[in-house]
Image: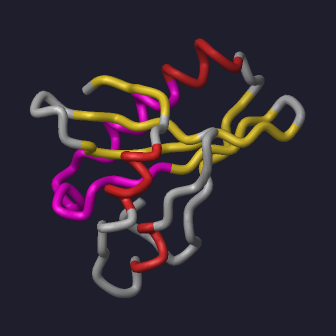
């Protein structure tokens, strides 16, 4: 995995991602504060964003639909936390996820 700044091309790719209901709203790309994460094949595997609220940094992650359910979320989340820790130095993180999403 390698992280990179969010690009317009990433946004176009994520716009093509479609999740099965009820996860459909997860396909939305956020904004320029997002980051892209690619795998060994340079395909976009995940995207994430950070949103600072004082000493707390809220984070969210979107995994490419064909990668969901394969147990990969944890490694992507850890990479996101490492990146955010190094660049933002928050006192704590808060994960943004739908309350009904038990898998997350």
**x, y percentage for residue 87?**
63, 16
- As drawn, 54 above or below 49: above
Name of the residue lying farthest toward the right: 54
**Side (left or right) of 36 relative to 55:** left
Q: Quadrant of the C terminus?
A: bottom left
Name of the residue lying farthest toward the top: 86
**x, y percentage for residue 39?**
19, 33
Name of the residue lying farthest toward the bottom: 21
**x, y percentage for residue 23?**
40, 77
Render colour scheme? secondary structure
Residue at image position (41%, 26%) is 4
In the image, residue 75 lies in the stretch drawn in magenta = yes
Residue 2 figure quarter? top left
Nearest to the observer: residue 29 or residue 92? 29
Residue 79 figure quarter? top left
Name of the residue lying farthest toward the front: 8
Q: How many marks?
A: 0
Residue 53 figure quarter? top right
Q: Please provide the residue range marked out in magenta.
A: 61-81
Q: Quadrant of the N terminus?
A: top left
Residue at image position (38%, 57%) is 12
- As drawn, 23 above or below 80: below
Residue at image position (79%, 35%) is 56
């Amino acid at each position: 995995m390698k992280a990179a700044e969010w690009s317009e091309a990433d946004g176009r790719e994520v716009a093509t991602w479609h999740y099965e209901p009820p996860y459909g709203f997860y396909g939305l790309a956020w904004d320029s504060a997002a980051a892209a994460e690619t795998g060994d094949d340079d395909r976009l595997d995940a995207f994430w964003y950070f949103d600072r609220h004082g000493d707390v940094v809220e984070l969210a992650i979107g995994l490419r639909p064909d990668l969901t359910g394969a147990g990969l979320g944890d490694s992507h989340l850890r990479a996101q936390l490492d990146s955010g820790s190094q660049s933002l130095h928050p006192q704590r993180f808060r994960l943004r996820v739908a309350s009904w999403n038990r898998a997350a």
